[in-house]
Amino acid sequence: MGSGVAMAENGIIARVSPSLQEVDANAWNALLARQAHPTPFMRHEYLHTLEASGSATPHTGWTPRHLTLWQDGQLAAACPLYLKNHSYGEYVFDWSWARAHAEHGLAYYPKALVAVPFTPVPGTRLLAQDGAARAALVQALRGWCAQAGVSSLHLLFVTAEDRAACAAAGLMQREGVQFHWTNQAPVPGGGTRRYRDFEDFLAHLNQDKRKKIRQERRRVAQAGVRFRWLRGADIGPQDWAFFYRCYERTYHEHGNPPYLTRGFFEHMAAHMPEAWVLFIAERVGQPIASSLIAVGAEPAGAGGEKDLESVAYGRYWGALERVDCLHFEACYYQPLQWCIAQGVRRFEGGAQGEHKMARALLPVATQSMHWLAHPAFAAAVDDFLQREAQGVGDYLAHLQAHSPLRAP
């Protein structure tokens, strides 16, 4: 189904759009700002740039079918929706589900996906003005999937509000694990405070981890590598161009073309510069590596709409030269040092990676929600997810028992 009216019920009109360009940017972003976890990756500029730059398009296996609900001419709910003909760039792996469908002569693709392409960052996926609008959005998703004849619907890295709405509509929950750092130093007698500096942070780690980090940082420094930080408009065109050389090379070294095009980052520089911080490693005055993080803000707590705190997201990196431990310095220690200096509350390290625990990024649970059209496959997946959830729970407990932080 292309653009136009997909449903009209109880005064609510649903539209499906083949491009986010058809949805008013101000209305989308205003709705996003009302959510509990409004990451910068859900902004209209970010999602539209994925399309306009050729990164997430039908040619790359991402066919936009963005769903919006309108009431009395106002945007009441919305979500980024894609038809997918593969499972790349999602970070919630369902390849075994696709194989099982194929073994029984059933098509798994196309499937429907509510997610931010190539971006495993938890946050609000169902933008809604209230709970009723969020529930109506899930029902509209289910209705559109049935009408389109897709095998399944998947909502990735969702919030508690999204989960509740999906569960009420009969979707199944899947558990995952990521590793996040929080700017919280325990204080005697209870409570926490922000770290004063990187040394203060190290002082709260156990001796082995503290010693290891100091050794790794020393190796980079002894190799003559120094870093400079750039944020927003201070990141010049030549800096973006150098970053892309690093980013592209890293993908090619792993035998894959990069997900994001050069044009994507050029658009980010032009339309969302304030959301990015670039770390450039230099040796003998020449740049040799870089890493890029994103920065957003979210309410500090319930009812804290005006009390926003910064959150940073580790995203991309690349190097033109090999230096021992440079990856750890560029992707963890420099961003953490910057976060401490800027008072950032949390740094999310992205998908996978137990090695992140040695850098004090601690395990947190993530969730996605799923619906499968075929009853027998849905029952089998539901059984699998329940057993998988028990395993993930045991894994989390094991990781949490081996925290690198010293006991207060």
Image (cartoon, rainbow, N blue to C red):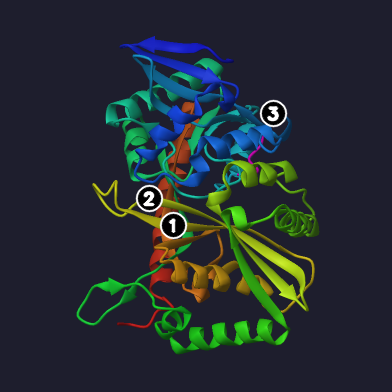
Give the spatial CA distance, label 1 vs label 3: 32 Å
* Amino acid type for the residue under numbered disc 3: Pro
Q: Name the disc covering residue 298, or none.
A: 2
Instruction: For the residues labelled 2 and 1, say whether their Cβ atoms are less than 8 Å apart.
Output: yes
Residue depicted at x 72% and y 67%: 289
* Figure quadrant of the N terminus: top right
**Nearer to us: label 3 or label 2:** 2
- Residue 182: which quarter of the image? bottom left
**Magenta includes 94?**
no
Q: Quick one: which residue is furthest to the left in this view?
A: 189
Give the spatial CA distance, label 3 vs label 2: 32 Å
- Residue 194: which quarter of the image? bottom left
Q: Name the disc covering residue 58, or none.
A: 3
Element under disc 2: strand
Q: Dot 1: few (<14), some (14–19), or many (≥20) neighbours within 10 Å?
A: some
Q: Main secondary structure of the magenta part?
A: loop
* Figure quadrant of the C terminus: bottom left
Q: Nearer the viewer, residue 181 or 178?
A: 181
Residue 308, image x, y percentages: 34, 53
Q: If you read the primary sequence from the N terminus, does the residue marked by circle 1 or circle 3 appear first? A: 3
* Amino acid type for the residue under numbered disc 2: Glu
Q: In the image, is 188 to the left or to the right of 63?
A: left
Does 192 appear above or below 278? below
Q: Give the range drawn in magenta.
A: 85-89
Whether residue 219 is visible: yes
**Residue identifier under label 1:** 311
Q: In the image, is 251 to the left or to the right of 400?
A: right
* Amino acid type for the residue under numbered disc 1: Val
**Nearer to us: label 1 or label 3:** 1
Does 32 appear above or below 76? below
Instruction: For the residues labelled 3 and 2, say whether their Cβ atoms are less than 8 Å apart.
Output: no
Residue depicted at x 39% and y 10%: 8
